[in-house]
Amino acid sequence: MRRFYAPDVKPGAHSLGADEARHLVQVLRAKPGDTVELADGRGAVFAAEIMALEKRHVLLTVGQPECYPKVGPGLTMMVSPTKHTDRFEWFLEKACECGVDRIQPIWTARSERRVEKIERWNRTLVEAMKQSRRAWLPTLKPALALAEALTQVDGDAWLGLAHCPVPEHPEWGRQSMAHALPKGRDAVIAVGPEGDFSPAEIQQFSESGFVPVTMGDHRLRTETAALYAVQAFHLINELK
C-alpha cells in the first residue's frame, strides 16, 4: 500500500497536502475507493480511503492509527554539508533509510558550501521515510556554526569525532569506530567537510568531550563517512 506524509492527520475526514495530492492524482492515477497509508512522521500510521479527488486536492476518510514507538538508543549526526548539495542529499536519503534520528548540519572553517536548503533537505527526508516505510521522520535541525552546535550537544550521549590524523596533535590516539561505540546508549557523531576539521576545531571537540575515532585506513568522502557512522551505530546496537 502506498504511503504518504501527513503531519497533521487525525482519524476522520482529512484533506491531503497539495504536493502529496498531486502525486497521488497525476502520477499514481488514484480514484475514489482506493486505499493508502498516511504517516505523521511521529510514529503513527493510518489507513485511509479516498473519497473524492481533484487535480491538487484529495479528500480521505482516515481510520485509527497503528503506532510504532521508538525503540533503542538514538543517533544524532553532526555533518558539514558538502560542496555539491546532491551528495549531502544522498546522505540524508540513505541515513533516513538506515534509521538516523537527528541530523545537525554544521558550518566549519573549511566548509566549502554555506547555503542551507532546509525545505529541500526536509523533502528528501520525507521521500526517504515514505520509500523505506519508516514511521518516524528524522529531525533536521537548522544549520549552525560549529561553536554554537557544540553548546547544544546532549551531555548524556556518547560523543564521537571522526577525523583524519592531525600532525598538530600526535598524542591523540583515534579508536576504531566499531570498538569505541557503546551499546544501548544515545550517540552524537561528528563528521567534517571535504577538507576535514581544522586543528583548532578538533581541540574544541576534545574540550566538549568527544572521543576521536577512525573508520579505517582509507580516506572517505564526507557523505560516505557519515553513512558509515550511521550503519556502525545500528549494527552495534543490533548485537545487544
Image (cartoon, rainbow, N blue to C red):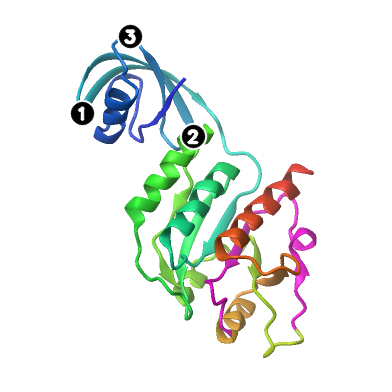
Residue 154 in the image, given as x and y percentages of width and height: 56, 62
Q: How far apart are marks 2 and 3 (CA)?
A: 23 Å
Q: In this view, does 164 lie to the left or right of 36?
A: right
Residue 136 in the image, given as x and y percentages of width and height: 50, 38
Q: Examine the rendering and report whether any part of residue 15 can be seen.
A: no
Q: Quadrant of residue 11?
A: top left
Which residue is the site of mark 2? Answer: 131
Q: Quadrant of residue 72?
A: top right
**Magenta includes 178?**
yes
If you read the primary sequence from the N terminus, does the residue marked by circle 2 or circle 1 appear first?
Answer: 1
Q: Is mark 2 on a helix, strand or loop?
A: helix
The residue that appears at 53% across and 35% down in the rendered structure is 132
Q: Quadrant of the C terminus?
A: top right
Which residue is the site of mark 3? Answer: 33
The answer to whether residue 44 is above or below residue 142 is above
Closer-to-camera residue (94/7) = 94
Q: In this view, does 69 lie to the left or right of 214?
A: left
Q: Is residue 87 left or right of residue 168?
A: left
The residue that appears at 75% across and 57% down in the rendered structure is 182
Q: In this view, does 237 lie to the left or right of 42?
A: right
Q: What element carries label 1?
A: loop
Q: What residue type is labelled 1?
A: Arg
Which residue is the site of mark 1? Answer: 56
Report the disc number at residue 80: none
The answer to whether residue 168 is above or below residue 188 is below
The residue that appears at 60% across and 53% down in the rendered structure is 75
Q: Examine the rendering and report whether any part of residue 164 can be seen.
A: yes
If you read the primary sequence from the N terminus, does the residue marked by circle 3 or circle 1 appear first?
Answer: 3
Q: Is mark 3 on a helix, strand or loop?
A: loop
Magenta-highlighted residues: 172-198
